[in-house]
Image: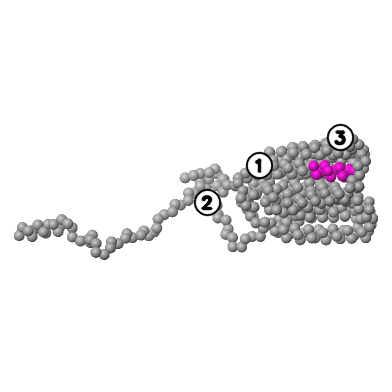
Amino acid sequence: MGYDEPGRDGPPEPASAGPATGAGAVLDDPDAEPARDRFGVYIVWETFLLLGFGALVYLVWREDSAVLRGSGLRDLIVDVIGLGLLALAVGLTLRTAAVNLAVGPVAVAAGLHFAEQSDRGVLGAVGTATAAAAIGGLLLGLVVVLLHVPGWAASLGGAAGVIVYIEQRSAPVLVQGDYDPRGTAGQLFVGFAAIAVFGGLLGAVSPIRRLVGRFRPIVDPARRRGTAAAVVATTGYVCSTVLATLAGVLIASMEGAVTPAAGLDWTVLAVGATLLAGTSAFGLRGGVFGTLVTAGAIGLFLAYAQALGWTVSRWTVGGVALAGGLVVTRLVETYGRPAPVLGALPPPPPEPAAEGGWSVTQPQPVGDWPPVLPAQPPVGSTDPWGARRWETGSRTWEADDR
């Protein structure tokens, strides 16, 4: 009789690094749905987002049409790109189920570095900041995957380290260079839109989506998810910190002066925008056009509030977007899963176990019951119940003596 340790008599969790076959097996999830997600919820929600975007365009045009023309439009586009890059950075790590909450401080730190070093050349300043961000993202990813700790906790620790760097400045830093992104606002927007939409389309492919979300916990959140999940999560951290750096450079070049701040308000705003765009807070699931439309809608709202003379902080907008994004996450997780298969048999129950951890052996199959009667001899054969040979022989001998 076999035995197990006490408390471990349930069915074992499948290994994450095992072979995978099919779309459902890529995630190594015993409860994973092998079919494709239902994208109807994303179509409906992104349609609502597009309607809200159109309503904001109308409100801004009615209040101050100069915002949507000429230099005002270029300013708006660059602001939307800056916020959109931060939302892409958060969205990428949310899809990998290892969110990076350090994007806001990274953006502020990159802006400070750009403001101080831009007089030595834009490419040099941006290149140095990007390289440092990539190394920092790699280290953060290694901490998360090697220790297998929650990404939000590790990234908060990384954010604290970046804030220490920011606090070395006590006064706003003027941008020393003369780089103005408004001259290439159209090209920058096309590039940003291409990255956002192409990334969303890739995420819509079931095998790629499940591979990207492989780090998402299944049964035990502390259980390691395998080498592929570790590589994907680390790559997400590297790309997110680079995107946050580019966003900080654009924001700094537009403001002209960078004020040393923690930058966590940018993180809240980016996380709220990403969740509101349709990316699940649990990872794995997300839409296609949501990030692009949501970033534009938030940029339009901030422009509308400024036109009305309102004082709206990023904390307020980010908090409202975050609250709405949590509701969207629930909708995505509820209606985005594959439809249940009609007529599917329920999974078999786990093997019963006795107290103390002793497993119960399975009963062995028995033969046919009742037993089969022996075959009857054919007609005409010797009767087994007839006279015995010695009796027949004795009678013949007695007849000869007479």
Tell me the element at label 1.
helix
Q: Mark 2 points at which residue?
A: 352
Q: Distance between the residues labelled 1 and 3?
A: 38 Å
Tag 2 and tag 1, C-beta contact below 8 Å: no
Query: Picture quarter containing residue 238?
Result: top right
Frontmost residue, 94 versus 122? 122
Q: Residue 168 carries which label?
A: 3
Who comes first in sequence, dot 1 or dot 3? 3
Label 1 sits on what residue type? Thr
Which one is closest to the eye, mark 2 or mark 3?
Answer: 3
Q: Residue at x 88, y 49 (%)?
A: 185
The residue lying furthest to the left in this view is 402
Task: Indicate whether 334 appears above or below 93.
Answer: below
Tell me the element at label 3.
loop
Tag 2 and tag 3, C-beta contact below 8 Å: no
Query: Picture quarter containing residue 118?
Result: top right
Q: In this view, does 367 lie to the left or right of 32?
A: left
Label 3 sits on what residue type? Gln
Task: Indicate whether 349 appears above or below 245.
Answer: below
Q: Which residue is drawn at 89% across and 51% down?
A: 76
Q: How far apart are marks 2 and 1 (CA)?
A: 33 Å
Who comes first in sequence, dot 2 or dot 1? 1
Is residue 188 at least partly visible in the picture?
yes
Q: Mark 1 points at which residue?
A: 227
User: What's drawn in magenta, residue-wise?
Assistant: 242-253
Tag 1 and tag 3, C-beta contact below 8 Å: no
Task: Indicate whether 165 appears above or below 299.
Answer: above
10 Å crowding of disc 1: few (<14), some (14-19), many (20+): some
Q: In this view, does 138 lie to the left or right of 259?
A: left
Task: Indicate whether 251 appears above or below 296.
Answer: above
Q: Residue at x 72, y 41 (%)?
A: 234
